[in-house]
Image (cartoon, grey):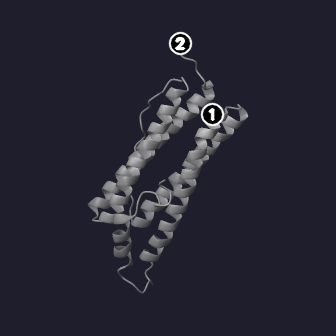
Amino acid sequence: MKANGLSQPLAKALNDQMTNEARNAQMYLAYASWASENEYTGIANFLFRHVNERRNYMMKFLEYILKRGAKVVVKAIPAPGPDPISINDCFEKIFTSEVENISKIYAIVNMSMAEKDWATFSFMQWFIKEQTEEETLEMDLLNKIKAAEDPDAKDDDTAYALDKDLVETPAMPHWHRM
């Protein structure tokens, strides 16, 4: 016999977040494909690595829901929307998605606190740390991209250098992977 250790609202919120992580993976996949088609090889590689990272997040939610004895509900993933129109647009959209994602994660944390579900509260701490690091990484990249796209920039090769740098840049900073 399986005990359901999650309340119905918390199970729904976790399932919704699992779907959101799958949607984010699809967004990264679409944008990585766009970057590749536009010959931004470094940016494409960087975004393709994020696809796998988001899929892993999705699986963490799935496994947690199962461990707690609740039902996993797999839903259709919404389309990622139109392709970016520029590198800046690409990363602006990604940053917006990251900000939306952290608000959803905070909502689950708040719900787990209200229900005194300390196991879920503890589980979600890892995602808070991840999202904070993601936002910082995206803000740093946006600053570099804005410098690269600045028409008054003295160096015409800045966009090329950024693309080249992202070939080796991990999805998350090396200090994060422990």
Q: Amino acid at mark 1?
A: Ala
Residue 120 location (% of width, % of height): 61, 35
Q: CA distance from mark 1 to mark 2?
A: 20 Å
- Name the residue tied to disc 1: 119
| Picture layout, residue 16 above or below residue 169 | above
Any part of residue 83 in sight: no
Image point (61%, 30%), residue name: 10
Q: Nearer the viewer, residue 89 or 176?
A: 176
The first of marks 1 and 2 along the sequence is 2
How many neighbours does mark 2 have within 10 angstroms: few (below 14), some (14-19), or many (20 or more)? few
The reply to whether callout 1 and callout 2 are in contact (CB within 8 Å) is no
Badge 1 marks a residue whose secondary structure is helix
**Badge count:** 2
- Give the image quarter of residue 119: top right
| 9 left or right of 23 in image | right
Image point (50%, 36%), residue name: 61
Residue 76 location (% of width, % of height): 41, 34
Badge 2 marks a residue whose secondary structure is loop
Q: Amino acid at mark 2?
A: Met
| Picture layout, residue 47 above or below residue 58 | below
Q: Nearer the viewer, residue 110 or 127?
A: 127
| 67 left or right of 167 in image | right
Image point (27%, 60%), residue name: 37
How many neighbours does mark 1 have within 10 angstroms: few (below 14), some (14-19), or many (20 or more)? some
Any part of residue 153 in sight: yes
| 124 left or right of 74 in image | right
Give me the disc on residue 146.
none
Residue 151 location (% of width, % of height): 43, 81
Residue 36 location (% of width, % of height): 29, 60
| 171 left or right of 137 in image | left
Image point (52%, 32%), residue name: 64
Give me the disc on residue 1.
2
